[in-house]
Amino acid sequence: MKIAIYGKGGIGKSTVTANLAAALAAEGRRVLQIGCDPKHDSTRLLLGGRVTTTILDFMREVPPMEQRLDRILHQGYGGVVCAEAGGPEPGIGCAGRGILSAFALFDRLGLRSDDFDVVLYDVLGDVVCGGFAVPLRQGFADVVYIVTSEEFMAVYAANNILRGVGNFEQNGPRLAGLILNSRGDGENPEPVRRFAQAVGLPIVCHLPRSDRFRRAETRHQTLVQAFPTAPETGLFRELARRALDPGPLHPARPLPEAGLEAAIFGTGSSGFVQPGRTGEPRPSRPAADDIPTTAGLPTLPPPPALRLSKSMLCREPLHGCAFAGAIGITVQIRDGITVAHGPRSCAHIASRAILASGIHSRIRRNRLLPRQLAPALISSDMNEGVVIHGGTDKLTHTLHQALALRPRAVFVVTTCPSGVIGDDPAAAIRAVTTGRTPPRLLPIATDGNLAGDYMQGVINACIEGAAALIDRSVRPEGNRVNILAEKNIANNAETNFEIVSDLLKHLGIAVNCRFVRNASVAELRRFRRAPLNLLAHEDHFGRVLRDYFREHHQAVFAAHPFPVGMTETERWLMDIARFFGKTESAAALLATHRQRYRALAQGLRPRLAGTKLMIVSYGHDIDWLLEAAFDTGMDVVRVGILNSSQDDLFRTRFTGRFSWATGYTREQRDADLLRLRPDLLLCNYIPTELPVAVRADSIPLCPDVGCYSGLALARRWVDLLKTPLREGWRDDA
Amino acid sequence: MTHRLLMGDIAPDSFTGAIIAVEGILDAAVLLNGPTGCKFYHGAIAETQLPRTGIMDPLQYAEEFYFGQPRVPATYLDGDDYIFGASEKLAGILPRVAGKGHRLIAVLNSPGAALIGDDLERFIAGASLSAPCLAIEHTGFSGTFSQGFQETVIRVLDRVAAPMARRRRTVNLIGTSVMHRHWQGSLDTLTELLSLCGIGVNSVLCAGCRVADLENVGAAEANLMLHPEWADQLSLYLGQRFSQPEVSPLSGAPIGFQATEQWLREVCTALATDPTPALGRLRASRQQAHQALSRFNTLTGLPRGATFALKADGSLALPLTRWLHEYLGMGPVAVQIGEGLPEQRRQLERFLGEIDCAAAWSARPGPLTPDLVFGGEGYIGEYRALGRPVAGIDIALPARGTVEILPRSLLGHSGALWLLERILNRLLTGD
């Protein structure tokens, strides 16, 4: 049983909730109480006055990989498990967003309501925004109580709460009744009775004003604990019994504002307003069984392993947003549509990054990539009204637009504004799901950068979007491979794929599915048909995907990513050939390439041998470059690896042959240049201001794959070393 | 390929418009209270469209808040900031940005930041900066680019502009931005033509101007609207505040020879000057064009009969369509307006009806393959994504992505020649 207790601020909700929890615990029930109030004092009486770390403070202070449930759950009186969401200082930040984040953490850490007989949500004041409505969402509270006093503003707030509850009643009524907490001696309960009658709710408990509450609080105890035989405690015991068996629940029938005062003070009668702002009836909903479950503590499987981007893992400033990263993946699915829920600027920014790669691929690589030139992306164009009143209707409308185009899958990706106001994509998806065979509708956790950086969005879209389409019943067969972790915004992604495909084709191996680039829903469904999987890049993203597929699909991976340079190509192709029993064909092919490679390297040696080379790179795997340098006799005097949002693991097979540093800085670079005076400096971006004159050249962030990538550059270095140390144009700055 | 699932380009909205308004001022800067996802794109586009440095090396801008870019420093909001506010970062970033010597700083909330209610004015007041600093807490959600642009220009003018003694026969150029294709070259061309007519340009709001130019905006005799759909609110504001009349040529923007000639005549009539010298310059360009067209047409029969699709803002779409049709003999198969006023849409629709091409009005890329496609690369890309072998002429952003060093213009006589050169070469090469 999951119970939400709402009511105006300062009305005594926390006292009521804590006493209800204590009474339930006294009956031997396992109880979890979650305080959803920035004041974070909901569970104080259960914890003997102890102040605990709130969930939001905990999230701020503890790195994601070290976050554990047992550090935010605290045991109180009668074994009641207590948690406080917490929130910002008054007047700053967004408390509603805080509630959303706290519940997302519960979700991530695998808190299961099934482990408790009763879960109590003690929720701040009015349902003022999406954050405070989280306990009303599907999968959370089964039953709602509203605490009120006899004061007009308390009843007014109760009426507003009914409006909020009404917006979440698609799966039936959830109101158990009102709890009247008298605020003074001799207060007239009649207005509350009239209100209860007008809205069709029972008053399930009437708590008289009593000094025992104050005395118990002085002892930092609930009334149930401090005065177990007091009459008021009896009322809580009765409320506890009722809470376990609330009987028929009631729909929300809020009064129109204009008639509220009249109804309460008995000066007239009022009509009811239906849930929703306009009073129009809501469309009927499909049965819950038809709906893909996407959120909600009770239905969650055991907590999954964290799949975090490098920036999230290291708690660095976030580079880009998860929203854009997710879109970069989902638009690659040929027969899918991505719905971007948010202001148009967000979809514009994300689409321009995709378009830029399409334009560059066409201009620089002569490759036409339709998915990049006209991505299947629809923006919900969230406007002012939506931001204030919630965006579920707008998202529903946009989903209908998307479905009218008959896609095989629809991905819903959300922005920061959507996340801040607490829109629930799952609710919109339920609204458009019909009885007939629907396309897959998949929400992806992004909320702009609330879910993380660009790479986090890429990871989430791969796992929650594309991987959710995989048919687990498909069995591996034939000489097929999947390709994973290609970089969709790299200009050479397509040409690299072509080079790799050609090598594989030579061995009679076909590509089954590109995960996720230019793939259809059908290809993704058949993902498991390939017996072997190949990573394009073994950077942080590649490693996350590999771990995921090994764990969830028992996928077998080749030992190495797409090869760059001769040695890597030999190793990579032979590995694959061994797997498929095709070593002879591979060896023959490689022998030809090796011979050609040697001849090319030998040809370059006379010009490059002994040349001092320094490399500064964002890439953490530059063996392809080092191989070319060493094979042509160059002297690598220094390698500086810059901090990158893409990777954090520098690796090399040439250990001991050169000196290197990670976390390299501009100052280190300048000092090394002065000290080492290299003949050639290689960087991803050629610096403009250097302390010494040096020939500098650029190296790609994503190198071309294949046997000759390094040598192709080395051939250029020969020409470069013949050029003047400083070009004339540099004098015109 | 699933054609029905290919979508059109998603236009920028009022948030981008607001940023570009300030970043279009040479000595002003946007300080973004927002995540890096909003920062990177705007930092890149601002520096591309109005470069302030030739240095692209991210290590050059490694300091906090800049993230490897010279433009649009940001508070890099993350999950915690959305809950607890970004007080600490705001307090840290303001003095850092002010230390760069900008003459004006606009602290601007991203759409997400606008919802958490950080009190920007409080931080600005607390920082006690010497340069004027403007708080723009909200730039609208999904408003049009021109809305965000104009509202921000007005906020800037509120802050810096003062009443000035009027300078006769000078104009402010309004309704253009650094996001217009070849904006600098177009302004150079028009300034030259106006100068030939004895008209001086007082200030160009906010496209490549300086804060000092904006302080003097009240000195102009009139406000000349280059693209009325980008200047309707601004013109009203300037009229009310400085009692300046607006000049809004009925011909639309001066694109192509016909519209440029009409534009010059209307402007000179409004300012009581003689257009003859500028018309002489225009005539010389037309003769230059005639020679090239004559040779090209003799050998190929083109450009007559070539078809085109076009997507442009309202002030460009009609004069360009008209010029392509009436001057070059080309036929429209699809014409769309991006940002535009209702009257511009009506006029264009009417014109297409008059030339028996009504089906072209607002037609999306579809079964017809035009010979030429005019628009941003997003629009041109839609045709290419459909497998249509079209030649594109990028008259809007995003551009083709090739390096451009020689100044190019889209407007005026130089713009007409540039367009013509592109048209003829594209018809020859097909790309």
Image (cartoon, rainbow, N blue to C red):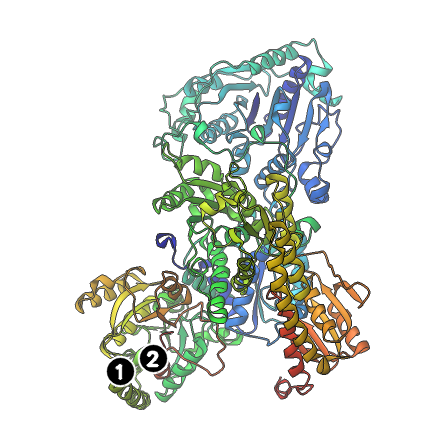
Q: Position of residue B172 (x, y in %)?
A: 41, 76
Marks 1 and 2, how far apart at CA: 9 Å
Which residue in the protein does label 1 denote?
B300
**Residue B428 — which label?**
2
The amino acid beneath tag 1 is: Thr
Q: Is residue A275 left or right of residue A690?
A: left
Which quadrant of the structure image shows residue A134?
top right
Regarding mark 1 in the picture, which secondary structure is present there?
helix
Residue B160 visible in the displayed image: no
The residue closer to the viewer here, B186 or A284, is A284
Marks 1 and 2 close (CB-CB < 8 Å)? yes
Q: Position of residue A612 (x, y in %)?
A: 76, 77
Residue A198 visible in the displayed image: yes
The residue closer to the viewer here, A47 or A428, is A428
Question: Is the residue marked by circle 2 packed among few (<14), some (14-19), or many (20+) residues within 10 Å?
Answer: some
Question: Is the residue marked by circle 1 packed among few (<14), some (14-19), or many (20+) residues within 10 Å?
Answer: few
Q: Position of residue A313 (x, y in %)?
A: 69, 49
Disc on the earlier residue, 1 or 2? 1
